[in-house]
Every structure is written in structure tokens, then in C-alpha cells.
């Protein structure tokens, strides 16, 4: 018995070693994802910020058919890099609503004029309240919402050229 | 080490410029009621800043941490209980957002560890003591 | 030329390390005299050659030899000499070379000065030391040659990152490495003793100075690192249970336990297996700590340092050394004679309790730090932070403080519980009086109340062993214990005061507006721009008034242009009874400035206590050394 017990430190060490080795060789995905996927969109009521564009409300989001909800800010450089892909999605017939995080009207106007405007509506989230309510951990992030107002997909980070097809397909199938 | 590393961590963060709008007042100012502020503070030290990944929202300069502090303070001021605010955030970000791992199927070995270690340690220590006659 | 000399020295040192392993193995296996006699001189020369290689690298940095890749990538001819000097180890290759140099020098020192151990055990120890060194030499020569040339030579260096240009860089890594190497020597002694089955008081006495020395440096490293984080991070916190901090705490906890168990082994020939095990654990913890910091597998402010290649190397060494030592332990310790056993109420009993509690805390910190990795294996993303560590380790730590108060008042071998209670009257009175006084005057929370009462009791208890004794005739190492334990009490008091009595004011203030924080009235006199080397800043002038004394603080908000970064430089004023901590935040858009102000009564005790703990270690080290010298002289006369 005592003989066997003497090997337990080695066993414990091998377990610790396995844990750290797996952390090294198979690093876990560290993306912080929203826990709301598959759940209903939380209450969203955001005033308009861009001239000629409506803001966002529960009614318009829950009953406006499937769409992409894009979280961005005019101060965020990756968001600018993402705009061409959003414009392509728009051209493919995907409706895109934007949530502008902590933005100002003049900055946003310049941003849309310079990089293009893929948005149907833009809500002004001046204190990141809606971003936090959505479980979003940064900008840019995009959510695919189905016709019933359920979140079906979250895309963390910039939508690259390779992601466009998948996102368009997700919106199409989110009837 | 922290002194070297913190600025470097900031540098290494993607070139996300910060928002230019000033943070909400409650991000960096206290609630008037000291009891409420103490509640808010206790909660904030146990919530993880999601963009910095190594700090609580109570001691982070990141703008999103400021937004989360404002959220916590305004909800406390509105009379919400800290536990409810934590639950609300966990519903959105998962257990990752809370530095206080909940007791559950995934964490019982963690919470049991101190007791288990004490018991095992006491058993090992017993062998160095003389048996009572 | 210097570079080639350095490289040659490094190759020779590696070859000698290999020879040292071979000779030690031969000598132990066959018992022949010639190989055995060769081990000591080889170890000494090996250490000298490693030092020569390090000296060559430093010379290259001081001379700004731009034909050497490492210098080009990490230095600049226009840097101040201190940063050229420190730049030699302010990078991966150089830091590895420094590590192996300290290791080699330590091995040499063992070879020169160690006269107590039986020859065979010493040879085995030096062999183990050479195995450790060999791993690092192999890595240096195979994958991170610090002396590689570039052709053609660069015109000038890329410079050391300006953020790394801090005097802390010159001292922090060497401090840590000395601590880690000291522990590795203790590990080698343990392996040597296992190989020859010579686990006993002589082995403990030979190992003790290395454990003490390592422990002093680890204590200093943690204390300095904590203060560094405190003033640099700008939110008034001094410990965050961050994985990197835990990585520095774990070897310290193991070394602290080892320090006490080695005393039991040296004095009473007990805890044999346990002491050997602790030496192995302490070394593993220093390797695991290094691994966690360098590999970046845990989310921390260190996330930038992700380097799986270095991580893999350290992991392989960790597996080989610790796995090998634990296998040796399992195979051999059963055949080592069991040590003495004790009665429960005795000094030995107290020290066993100390070891038990320290080891449990160590286990809790290790499990808590690694748990997110385990959870990730099962697809669960979670965070383990201060609430867990405080709840799980806090109560055990408080129990440890009680044990620490009682332990030194116990007699060796056998003591009487009633007599002990008699001796504990004053500490218990001090704790009770403090607790009652605090509840009556300024009630803190439960944990700070416990902490402050315990600190008072512990402070009284820790000086009792020297009360009533002639201070000049009391051995120096007893003073060391007293000072170190007093340091813990002082530090604990600082922590409890900080958590209970810190006054915080977060406010958006206009110029000229007075703000209250604790006993101070702080006024924002104005904001002005300042220009630095590679930054510009907005600097606030704050005048803080208490009673009739006014002092000025100048916190800054710094902007770095390349790349765009903003940092807060706190301004701290230290008083006898605490610190006023001020930070300038951002403007709120309406002409006001965010200010973060804290009055932290007696917070400095935390680090002052840390200094006392290290001083206690130093006194013990010198005391033990003097006693052994005297004993050796006496023996020589006899």
C-alpha cells in the first residue's frame, strides 16, 4: 500500500503536466462569445443618429424579417476595414442594421461618407448599453437575427471576404 | 514585471482606437449613497473586463470596462441587487465574465479542492506523529 | 572576436557539464576514485566558463558591437550604459544565458565550499546540477545562440523598447533567477541525497543556506513586484491573483514550507521524505511559474508574450526533471530509513502544521490558477479570480498566522498544552484588546477585523522568544525568525488596514474645486502639458491639505504617439500614516477632469513587512553561517 502511495506525487504531476501541455499544444478558443445565441433578442430601443435613417426599436427588429445586426463605431479602424464586405452583403440583398457604439453624429457622417453606407437603420448606443445587453465583447461584431427576433449566429471580429458567403447563407436560412 | 507588461499588453492590443466620446459619468464617479457605492464596488471587483482579459472592471482603463462600471452603478442606484446584476451579465457572457466561479457541475472539484487538500494533508502529517499509547 | 570567445566558452561549459554528468555517474556506479575526484574541479571550471560567456555578452552590449544579432535587435549605441548593461539580459537569449550562468556559479560554489556532505552524496548532487545545466546549455546552443553574427554588420541597433528602459529591468530578472537557481540547488541536493539514500541532518544543513538564500530573493522579488504593480497600474490595487502573480507566489510558498521542514530535519532528523518531496515541489513550481509566464497559456496581462516554442522547451525540461525526480523519489524513498516521529504538542508539531497549511495554500493556488485550463478542456469558459482565492486561501492563511504565533513558543520534543496557554497570555490579550478597541472605535469588516487582531497577537507573540534574553547572546538566527515573523504581522496589518480603511473619491473636478478624500482636501490647481522623451503628457497640479500642511502632487496622463497609447502615471505622496494616491483621468467634455483619489492608511506596511521578512531571512542566513564556522573551528581544535 505504502509503495503505491509513493507513486501518487508522480501521478499528480503527470496530470498537471497534461493540463498545461494541452493548454500549450491545443490552445482553447479564447473568443468571448455571447450566451444569447438561440435566444430572443433583448429589448433594443435606440434613437437615430444619422440623418435620414431611423433608429432601432423592438418592433422594427422583431418584425422586420431576417437581418444582420452590425455593432460598430466610427472610431474603430477594423470597422472601416469591414465596410466593403458589408456593402457586398447589402448588394446580395441582406438587410443590415447598425448599432453605433459611443459615436457622435458628425464623426459617423464622415465615416459613412468616406467608407460607404451599408445600413438600413442605425441606432445610437451612446453608453454601450445595448452592446452589453447583447453579450457583445467588442467592435466590430455582427449578429444574424431571424424573422422572429431570435439570435441565430454571432460573428466576432471583422467580417472578412471569406466570411461573406456563410453570413449571407445564414441570413437566407434564418426565415 | 507588471510595469513592463501592462503597457506592452496595451500596445499589443489590436489598433482599436478608443471612442472619442467622454465616458458616462457613472463610469468614473461614485454613487452618492456610500452603502450603494460599496455594493457596486464589491461587485465590480469580481467582474472581468472582457477586452483586457486580465483585470477586473474595477481596475481597468479600457473604455468598455468604464461602460460596464456605469451599468453596474446605475443598476445599483435603481435598487437592483448585486446578485441580480451578476446573473444578468452571466446570461449574456457566460461564467467567463464573473471572477467568482459559481458552484456547479463544472466547478465542484475546484471548490472542494481546499477541503480535500486539508484532509489529505492531515492524513500525511499524521504519519509523522507518535502513536498514543 | 569577443563573440567567438563567448561562444567558445559556452560550448566548453556545455561539454564540461556533460563530462560532469558522466564522471559523477561513473564514480557513483563503480566507486572509482579518479572520476569521483574529477567532479569538483569540473564543476568549478564549468561555472567559470559560463560566467566568461556572460561577461563576453555584456562586453558586446557595452561596446555596442553591431555585428552581433542580439545587440542589433535589442540595443542602441546612444543608450545610457545602465540600459546597455541590463539590455544583455533584457531579451530571451541573454536571460537564458544569465540563468545558466548563475546556475553554473552556484554549482561551482557548492563544489568549493561544501565540506559537510559525504563525498558520494556531493558527487550525486553536482551530477544532478550538471544535468539541469546541460538542458539549458543545449537549448542555448541549439536554438537560441546569443552570439550569432549578422553580415553585413548593422549601422546601429533597433534599440531597447523605451518602455523596458527602467532601472527595474536591471535588477528584477537577476533577483528572480537567483531565487530560482537557489531552489534548483536545493533540488539537486535532494536528488543527490535520494541517489545515495543519505537523507538526514547533514543533508539538511548543507541544503539550508541555499533554501534560505533563494527564499530571501523570492521574497524581495514578490514584494518589489507588488509595489511596482501598485504604483504603475493606477487603481490602487497591489495584488490581483493574476496567473503571473500566482506563478511567483507558488515557488515562494513551497520554499517557505521547505525552509521550515529543513529545520526539523536538521535539528530533529524528522520529516525526511517530506523535505525531499518539498525540494522537488519547490523546483517544479519555479519551472511551472516560468512556463506559465513565458508560454502565455493563461490569460493575463502577459498575453503578449505568447511564445509556444519557448514554452515547449521549458515544458520538456519540466517533464524530464520533475518527472525523473518524482520517479526516483517513489523508487528510493521507501528504502530510506524513516525519520524520528514527534508528539503533537511540540515545536516539531507546530512546524508540521505550518508545512501542512502552507502546502494546502500552495495546492489551492495551483488548482485555482490552472482550473480555467481544465474547464476549457471540457468546453467550459470560466474565470477564477479574487473571490475564489480569498475565500479558499484566506481562512487557511489566517489559521497559518495562528500557528505562526504559537509555533516559536513551543519547546522541541515535548511540550505541555497548559504551559503553552500560559505563554500565550500576552499575544491573546493583544489580539483581544485590538479587536475590542477596533470594534468600539472604527469597526472594520469581519476579515480585516480578524486580520488586524491576529496581526497584533502575532506581533507580540513573534517577539516573545527574545524577551528576557540577553540580546547579544541570543543567536542571530533566532533574531532572524523573530524579524521575519514580525514582518508577516506588519504586512498583514497593512493589508487589513488597506482593505478596511481606504477612502476613495472618484470625481470629475473643475480647476479650483476642492475635493475631500479621507483627512485631505485636494484641490485641482491646473492642468499643463509636459513633453518627455517619447511621450507628451497632460500633468495635473494637485495641492493636498491636511490640518495645515499642504503638499503638491503631479499625476500625468501620458500619450505615446508610436503606437498610439495613453497611460496614467499616478502620483503618490507617502506619509508616516499612509499614502495619498492620485490619478488623473480623462476630461469629461464639460470642462471637468476625472480624478481618482485614494487615502490608504498604513498601506506601506505591506511592503515594509515584506522587507522585514527578507531581512529576517538574511539574519538567519548569517547566523547559521557564523554558528557553523564556529563549530568547524572548534572541531579543528579538538
Image (cartoon, rainbow, N blue to C red):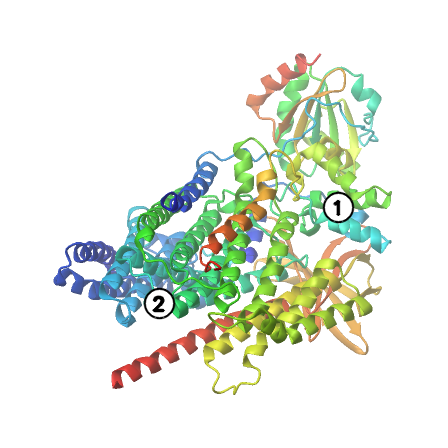
Vertical side of B114 occupied by C445: above or below: below
In percent of width and height, residue C76 lies at 43, 59
In percent of width and height, residue A166 lies at 59, 18
Which residue in the protein does label 1 denote? B69
Disc 2 crowd, CA 10 A, few/some/many (<14, 14-19, 20+): many
- Left/right of residue C558 with respect to residue C85 in the rendered view: right
Which residue sits at x=75%, y=67%? C542
- Structural distance between the alpha carbons of marks 1 and 2: 57 Å
B64 or A148: nearer the eye? A148
- Left/right of residue C140 with respect to residue A65 in the rendered view: left
In percent of width and height, residue C31 lies at 15, 59
Say which element carries label 1. helix
- For residue C556, which quarter of the picture? bottom right
Which residue sits at x=61%, y=57%? C239
Quarter of the image with the C terminus of chain C is bottom left
Residues flagged by tags 1 and 2 on a common chain: no
Quarter of the image with the N terminus of chain C is bottom left
Vertical side of C474 occupied by C462: above or below: above
Which residue in the protein does label 2 denote? C201
C240 or C330: nearer the eye? C330
Amino acid at each position: 500500500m505504502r509503495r503505491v502511495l509513493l507513486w501518487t506525487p508522480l501521478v499528480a504531476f503527470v496530470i498537471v503536466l497534461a493540463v498545461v501541455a494541452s493548454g500549450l499544444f491545443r490552445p482553447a478558443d479564447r473568443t468571448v462569445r455571447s450566451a444569447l445565441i438561440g435566444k430572443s433578442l433583448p429589448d433594443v430601443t435606440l434613437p437615430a443618429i444619422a440623418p435620414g435613417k431611423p433608429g432601432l426599436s423592438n418592433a422594427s427588429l422583431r418584425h422586420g424579417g431576417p437581418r444582420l445586426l452590425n455593432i460598430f463605431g466610427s472610431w474603430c479602424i477594423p470597422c472601416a476595414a469591414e465596410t466593403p464586405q458589408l456593402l457586398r452583403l447589402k448588394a446580395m440583398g441582406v438587410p443590415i442594421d447598425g448599432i453605433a457604439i459611443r459615436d457622435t453624429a458628425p464623426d459617423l457622417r464622415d465615416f459613412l461618407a468616406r467608407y460607404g453606407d451599408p445600413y438600413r437603420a442605425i441606432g445610437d448606443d451612446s453608453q454601450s448599453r445595448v452592446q452589453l445587453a447583447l453579450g457583445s465583447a467588442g467592435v466590430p461584431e455582427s449578429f444574424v437575427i431571424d424573422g422572429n427576433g431570435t439570435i441565430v449566429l454571432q460573428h466576432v471580429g471583422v467580417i472578412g471576404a471569406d466570411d461573406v458567403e456563410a453570413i449571407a447563407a445564414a441570413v437566407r436560412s434564418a426565415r | 514585471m507588471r510595469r513592463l507588461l501592462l503597457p506592452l499588453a496595451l500596445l499589443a492590443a489590436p489598433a482599436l482606437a478608443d471612442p472619442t466620446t467622454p465616458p458616462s459619468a457613472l463610469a468614473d464617479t461614485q454613487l452618492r449613497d456610500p452603502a450603494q457605492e460599496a455594493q457596486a464596488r464589491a461587485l465590480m471587483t469580481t467582474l472581468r473586463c472582457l477586452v483586457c482579459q486580465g483585470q477586473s472592471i474595477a481596475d481597468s482603463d479600457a473604455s468598455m470596462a468604464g461602460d460596464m462600471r456605469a451599468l453596474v452603478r446605475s443598476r445599483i442606484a435603481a435598487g437592483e441587487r448585486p446578485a441580480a446584476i451578476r446573473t444578468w451579465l452571466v446570461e449574456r457572457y457566460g461564467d467567463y465574465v464573473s471572477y467568482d466561479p459559481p458552484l456547479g457541475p463544472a466547478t465542484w472539484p475546484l471548490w472542494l479542492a481546499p477541503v480535500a487538500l486539508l484532509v489529505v494533508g492531515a492524513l500525511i502529517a499524521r504519519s509523522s506523529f507518535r502513536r498514543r499509547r | 572576436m569577443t563573440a567567438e570567445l563567448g561562444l567558445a566558452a559556452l560550448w566548453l561549459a556545455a561539454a564540461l557539464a556533460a563530462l560532469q554528468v558522466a564522471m559523477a555517474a561513473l564514480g557513483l556506479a563503480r566507486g572509482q576514485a579518479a572520476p569521483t575526484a574529477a567532479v569538483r574541479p569540473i564543476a568549478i571550471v564549468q561555472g567559470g566558463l559560463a560566467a566568461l560567456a556572460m561577461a563576453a555578452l555584456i562586453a558586446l552590449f557595452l561596446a555596442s558591437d553591431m555585428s552581433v544579432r542580439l545587440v542589433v535587435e535589442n540595443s542602441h549605441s546612444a543608450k545610457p550604459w545602465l540600459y546597455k548593461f541590463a539590455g544583455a539580459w533584457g531579451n530571451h537569449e541573454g536571460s537564458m544565458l544569465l540563468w545558466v550562468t548563475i546556475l553554473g556559479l552556484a554549482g561551482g560554489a557548492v563544489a568549493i565550499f561544501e565540506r559537510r556532505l559525504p563525498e558520494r552524496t556531493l558527487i550525486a548532487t553536482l551530477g544532478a546540477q550538471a544535468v539541469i545545466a546541460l538542458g539549458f546549455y543545449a537549448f542555448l546552443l541549439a536554438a537560441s545562440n546569443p552570439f550569432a553574427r549578422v553580415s553585413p554588420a548593422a549601422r546601429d541597433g533597433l534599440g531597447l523598447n523605451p518602455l523596458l528602459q527602467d532601472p527595474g529591468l536591471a535588477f528584477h530578472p537577476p533577483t528572480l533567477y537567483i531565487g530560482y537557481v537557489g531552489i534548483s540547488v536545493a533540488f539537486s541536493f535532494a536528488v543527490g541525497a535520494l541517489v545515495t539514500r543519505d537523507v538526514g541532518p547533514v543533508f539538511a544543513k548543507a541544503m539550508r543556506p541555499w533554501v534560505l538564500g533563494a527564499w530571501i530573493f523570492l521574497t524581495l522579488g514578490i514584494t518589489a513586484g507588488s509595489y511596482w504593480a501598485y504604483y504603475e497600474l493606477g487603481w490602487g490595487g497591489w495584488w490581483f491573483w493574476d496567473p503571473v502573480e500566482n506563478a511567483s507566489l507558488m515557488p515562494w510558498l513551497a520554499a517557505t514550507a521547505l525552509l521550515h521542514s529543513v529545520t526539523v530535519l536538521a535539528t530533529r532528523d524528522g520529516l525526511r521524505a517530506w523535505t525531499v518531496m518539498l525540494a522537488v515541489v519547490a523546483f517544479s513550481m519555479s519551472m511551472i511559474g516560468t512556463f506559465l509566464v513565458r508560454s502565455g497559456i493563461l490569460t493575463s496581462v502577459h498575453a503578449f508574450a505568447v511564445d509556444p516554442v519557448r514554452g515547449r522547451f521549458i515544458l520538456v525540461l519540466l517533464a524530464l526533471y520533475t518527472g525523473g525526480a518524482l520517479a526516483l523519489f517513489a523508487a528510493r524513498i521507501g528504502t530510506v530509513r524513516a525519520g524520528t516521529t514527534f508528539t503533537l504538542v511540540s515545536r516539531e508539531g507546530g512546524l508540521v502544521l505550518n508545512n501542512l497549511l502552507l502546502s494546502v495554500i500552495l495546492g489551492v493556488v495551483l488548482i485555482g490558477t490552472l482550473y480555467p485550463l481544465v474547464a476549457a478542456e471540457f468546453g467550459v469558459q470560466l474565470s477564477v479570480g479574487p473571490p475564489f482565492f480569498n475565500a479558499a486561501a484566506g481562512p487557511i492563511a489566517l489559521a497559518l498566522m495562528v500557528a505562526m504565533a504559537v509555533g516559536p513558543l513551543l519547546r522541541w520534543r515535548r511540550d505541555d498544552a497548559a504551559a503553552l496557554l500560559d505563554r500565550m497570555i500576552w499575544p491573546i490579550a493583544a489580539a483581544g484588546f485590538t479587536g475590542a478597541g477596533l470594534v468600539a472605535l472604527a469597526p472594520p469588516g469581519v476579515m480585516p477585523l480578524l486580520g488586524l487582531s491576529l496581526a497584533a497577537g502575532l506581533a507580540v507573540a513573534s517577539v516573545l522568544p527574545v524577551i528576557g534574553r540577553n540580546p547579544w547572546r541570543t543567536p542571530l538566527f533566532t533574531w532572524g525568525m523573530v524579524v521575519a515573523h514580525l514582518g508577516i504581522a506588519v504586512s498583514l496589518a497593512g493589508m487589513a488596514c488597506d482593505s478596511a480603511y481606504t477612502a476613495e473619491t472618484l470625481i470629475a473636478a473643475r480647476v479650483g474645486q476642492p475635493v475631500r478624500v479621507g483627512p485631505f482636501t485636494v484641490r485641482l490647481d491646473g492642468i499643463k502639458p509636459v513633453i518627455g522623451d517619447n511621450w507628451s503628457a497632460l500633468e495635473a497640479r494637485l495641492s493636498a491639505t491636511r490640518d495645515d500642511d499642504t503638499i503638491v502632487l503631479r499625476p500625468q496622463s501620458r500619450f505615446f504617439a508610436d503606437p498610439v497609447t495613453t497611460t496614467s502615471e499616478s502620483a503618490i505622496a507617502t506619509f508616516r500614516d499612509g499614502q495619498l494616491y492620485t490619478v488623473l483621468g480623462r476630461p469629461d467634455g464639460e470642462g471637468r477632469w476625472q480624478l481618482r483619489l485614494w487615502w490608504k492608511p498604513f498601506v506601506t506596511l505591506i511592503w515594509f513587512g515584506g522587507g522585514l521578512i527578507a531581512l529576517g531571512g538574511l539574519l538567519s542566513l548569517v547566523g547559521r553561517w557564523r554558528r557553523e564556522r564556529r563549530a568547524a573551528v572548534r572541531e579543528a581544535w579538538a
